[in-house]
Image (cartoon, coloured by chain):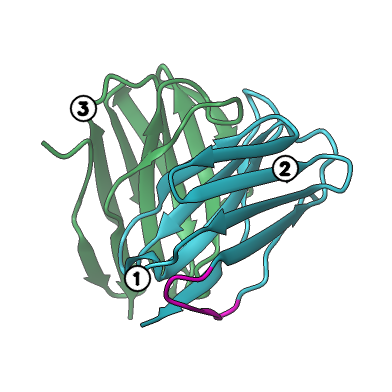
């Protein structure tokens, strides 16, 4: 009964390819996020959605496009992958927006390697 | 640019001793403060949150907040080898704003 799940766990691909990462939460939360954690372990927010509405869109290249078909799912599509996109991508969810006082629950992460 | 600063470590502490982890933040309007623990190769998990000045205790963990000094700390008493992990400090301003994470402090408990 994984609370926040992501697929795939590992993704190895060539530069220039397009790939997607899927995220699902079964906690009944209203808010979902994508974070990027680089090789230096710096965890930085990319996007947040609340009730399928985009709330936070950080300075992320427009090659990254999130899609939230419903409250329980938030997918991340990446076009024209670059070497610098190599990182671990974490999905997370919280009951409400976590900038307030809500705990975020993180998925297991997707390790993306661009060759 | 809002920042959250942590000493990257590693911080080495003998088993049974108190581990003290520190975090400073630049945004005076910050209202919510979180400590996440991340084991190597795993995802972050929340261990403590604090909103008001002072101390908050939960088992072996104590979070301390000083808004005037823009400083938040985490104390771990009776440190165990299982406490060895990276500890991420995170700060939030308001509901609609993002949570900003520090780069984390690597803690190593020496058996």
**Location of residue B91 in the rendering, given as x and y in whole percent from the top left corner:** 65, 43
- Residue B13 can be seen, yes or no: yes
Furthest residue toward right: B68
Q: Is residue B62 above or below residue A99?
A: below
- Which residue is painted at 24% across and 72% down in the image? A12
Q: Nearer the viewer, mark 3 or mark 2?
A: 2
Residue beneath label 1, please? B40
- Same chain, marks 3 and 2? no
**Location of residue A59 in the rendering, given as x and y in whole percent from the top left corner:** 63, 49
Name the side, left or right, on which A55 lies relative to B109. Answer: right
> In the image, which residues are magenta?
B9-17
- Which residue is painted at 62% across and 63% down in the image? B21
**Disc 3 and disc 2 in contact, CB within 8 angstroms:** no
Q: How much space separates mark 1 and mark 2, taking CA atoms? A: 27 Å
Residue beneath label 2, please? B65
For this rendering, which residue is in front, B99 or A13?
A: B99
Q: How many marks?
A: 3
The C terminus of chain B appears in which quarter of the rendering?
bottom left
Q: Pinpoint the chain carrying mark 1.
A: B
Q: Earlier in the sequence, mark 1 or mark 2?
A: 1
**Location of residue A113 in the rendering, given as x and y in whole percent from the top left corner:** 32, 73
Q: How much space separates mark 3 and mark 2, taking CA atoms? A: 33 Å
Question: Circle 3 sits in a helix, a strand or a loop, which is it?
Answer: loop
Residue beneath label 3, please? A26
Name the side, left or right, on which B5 lies relative to A84. Answer: right
Q: Colour of chain A?
A: green
């Amino acid at each position: 009964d994984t609370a926040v799940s992501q697929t795939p766990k590992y993704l190895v691909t060539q530069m220039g390819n397009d790939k997607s990462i899927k995220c699902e939460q079964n906690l009944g939360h209203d808010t979902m996020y994508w974070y990027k954690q680089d090789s230096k372990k710096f965890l930085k927010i990319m996007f947040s959605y609340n009730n399928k509405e985009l709330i936070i869109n950080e300075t992320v290249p427009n090659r990254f496009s999130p899609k939230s078909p419903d409250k329980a799912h938030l997918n991340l599509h990446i076009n024209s992958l670059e070497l610098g996109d190599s990182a671990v991508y974490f999905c997370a969810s919280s009951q409400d927006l976590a900038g307030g006082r809500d705990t975020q629950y993180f998925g297991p992460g997707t390790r993306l390697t661009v060759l | 640019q809002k920042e959250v600063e942590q000493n990257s470590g590693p911080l080495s502490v003998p088993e049974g001793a108190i581990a003290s982890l520190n975090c400073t933040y630049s945004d005076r309007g910050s209202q919510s403060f979180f400590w996440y623990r991340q084991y190597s190769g795993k995802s972050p998990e929340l261990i403590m949150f604090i909103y008001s000045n002072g101390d908050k205790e939960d088992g072996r963990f104590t979070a301390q907040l000083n808004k005037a000094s823009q400083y938040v700390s985490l104390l771990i008493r009776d440190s165990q080898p299982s406490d060895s992990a990276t500890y991420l400090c995170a700060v939030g301003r308001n509901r609609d704003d993002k949570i900003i994470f520090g780069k984390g402090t690597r803690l190593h408990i020496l058996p």
